[in-house]
């Protein structure tokens, strides 16, 4: 939607997240995010457990929040006001956040300060997810086929285009264009490729899901891709490996799919909710959770075969979450929520 959201096909809420207005000056300058006393109650889109008691959340207007206990949050100083959609850390010091304006931010001091590595306000195309294999090698993906890679920790980012990620019906046309008009080929490819909504690292395999049933995987950290057979026409917003080694994919209108053969075939999982699902995550006890719009929160105790309803009564969209022993931390359209989990259920 949105990991996560923010585009056509993602949730209506995230799509409604407008980029900050930037003055039409020849020399565009970004402005620092405002320090807000209630930033932890604003729209937040992603959360990451960096280490045992260290958490980072990101959201609208360049908000980045840090916590050392999951209860108390401090807003970091951020040089951009762009909406942020995803955050990733490789260790307690080195992290990256991505968002609107194809913005990429980096920290080397545990999130206390952030530096701009990339910022393209025109045209406004959001980055939706980021993943780093180590401190040097990273990938950022987003709307309209945006795909950037770095091999130097983000000091430089290179945009990549993969014809193998285009739909089968478009490949012949693109191959002809590649030979006859290379400049038009790159422009056309960027308009034909789908939105890339989420990256998921599964050991040595990297998965990517997106709009119109898009799913692909790479065995060489994104240097080449295999677009997998489509099993669903709507957008997919997250992919997750279950505790029992299944794969779960979630997307628009409450659609959930499960694979027991690493994505070669998929079976739909029936659930009681029809709201768009933004993320899927699990805990150390083997529970699997689905989070989505309209307060949707579902729990599975049988590895994603069936789900029970734990939805929030306020109906506020849940973008992502994680579980800590007897607590669940959620990032929502009204900020951080902390839920106490009854382990006796």
Image (cartoon, rainbow, N blue to C red):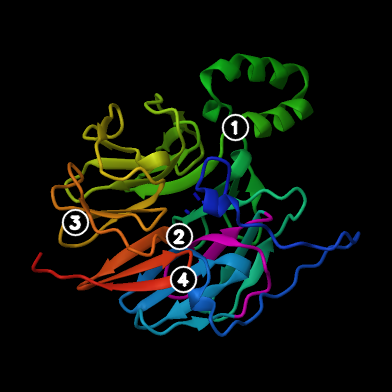
290 to the left or right of 304: right
Reading the image, the residue beneath label 1 is: 193
Residue 98 counted in the magenta span: yes
Rate crowding at label 1 as few (under 14), some (14 to 19) or many (20 or more) other CA atoms within 10 Å. Answer: many
Nearer to us of marks 4 and 3 is 4
Mark 4: few/some/many CA within 10 Å (<14, 14-19, 20+): many
Position of residue 95 in the picture relative to residue 117 (left or right): left
Q: Residue at x 50, y 34 (%)?
A: 224
Q: Secondary structure at mark 1?
A: loop
* Observer-nearest of 46 and 264: 46
Magenta region, residue range: 77-101
- Give the residue at x 27% y 41%: 247
Total labels: the figure holds 4
Distance between the Cα atoms at labels 4 and 2?
29 Å
| Residue 182 pos. (x, y %) | 75, 26
Q: Residue furthest right?
A: 26
SS of the residue under disc 3 = loop
Q: Which residue is mark 3?
A: 287
Q: In this figure, which residue is indicated by the disc labeled 4?
A: 335
* Mark nearer the N terminus (1 vs 2): 2
Tell me the crowding category of disc 3: few under 14, some 14 to 19, or many 20 or more residues within 10 angstroms, Cα based.
some
Q: Is residue 205 above or below residue 74?
A: above
| N-terminal-most mark, 4 or 2 | 2
Nearer to us of marks 1 and 4 is 4
Which sits earlier in the primary sequence, circle 1 or circle 4? Answer: 1
Query: Percent x, y for residue 317?
Result: 43, 58
Q: Classify residue 329 as left or right of residue 287.
A: right
Q: Sequence order check: which comes first, mark 2 or mark 3?
A: 2
Q: Between disc 1 and disc 3, whose residue precedes? A: 1
């Amino acid at each position: 939607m949105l990991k996560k959201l923010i585009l056509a096909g993602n949730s209506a809420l995230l799509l409604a997240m407008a980029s900050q207005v930037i003055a039409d000056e020849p020399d565009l300058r970004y402005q620092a995010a405002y320090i807000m006393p209630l930033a932890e109650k604003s729209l937040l889109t992603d959360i990451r457990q960096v280490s045992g008691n260290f958490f980072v959340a990101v959201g609208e207007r360049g908000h980045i929040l840090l916590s050392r206990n999951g209860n108390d949050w401090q807003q970091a100083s951020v040089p951009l006001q762009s909406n942020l959609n995803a955050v990733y850390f490789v260790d307690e010091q080195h992290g990256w956040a991505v968002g609107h304006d194809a913005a990429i931010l980096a920290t080397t001091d545990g999130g206390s300060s952030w530096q701009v590595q990339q910022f393209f306000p025109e045209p406004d195309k959001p980055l939706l997810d980021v993943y780093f294999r180590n401190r040097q090698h990273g990938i950022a993906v987003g709307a309209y086929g945006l795909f950037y890679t770095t091999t130097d920790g983000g000091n430089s980012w290179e945009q990549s285009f993969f014809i193998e990620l285009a739909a089968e019906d478009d490949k012949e046309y693109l191959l002809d264009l590649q030979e006859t008009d290379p400049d038009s080929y790159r422009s056309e490819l960027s308009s034909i490729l789908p939105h890339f909504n989420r990256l998921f690292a599964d050991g040595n395999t990297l998965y990517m899901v997106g709009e119109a049933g898009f799913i692909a995987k790479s065995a060489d950290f994104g240097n080449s891709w295999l677009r997998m057979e489509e099993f669903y026409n709507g957008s997919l917003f997250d992919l997750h490996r279950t505790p029992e080694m299944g794969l779960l994919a979630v997307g628009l209108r409450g659609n959930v799919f499960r694979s027991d053969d690493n994505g070669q075939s998929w079976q739909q999982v029936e659930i009681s909710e029809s709201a768009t699902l933004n993320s899927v995550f699990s805990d150390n006890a083997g529970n699997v959770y689905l989070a989505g719009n309209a307060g949707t929160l579902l729990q599975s105790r049988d590895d994603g075969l069936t789900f029970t309803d734990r939805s929030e009564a306020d109906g506020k969209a849940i973008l992502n979450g994680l579980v800590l022993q007897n607590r669940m931390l959620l990032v929502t359209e009204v900020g951080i929520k902390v839920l106490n989990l009854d382990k006796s259920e």
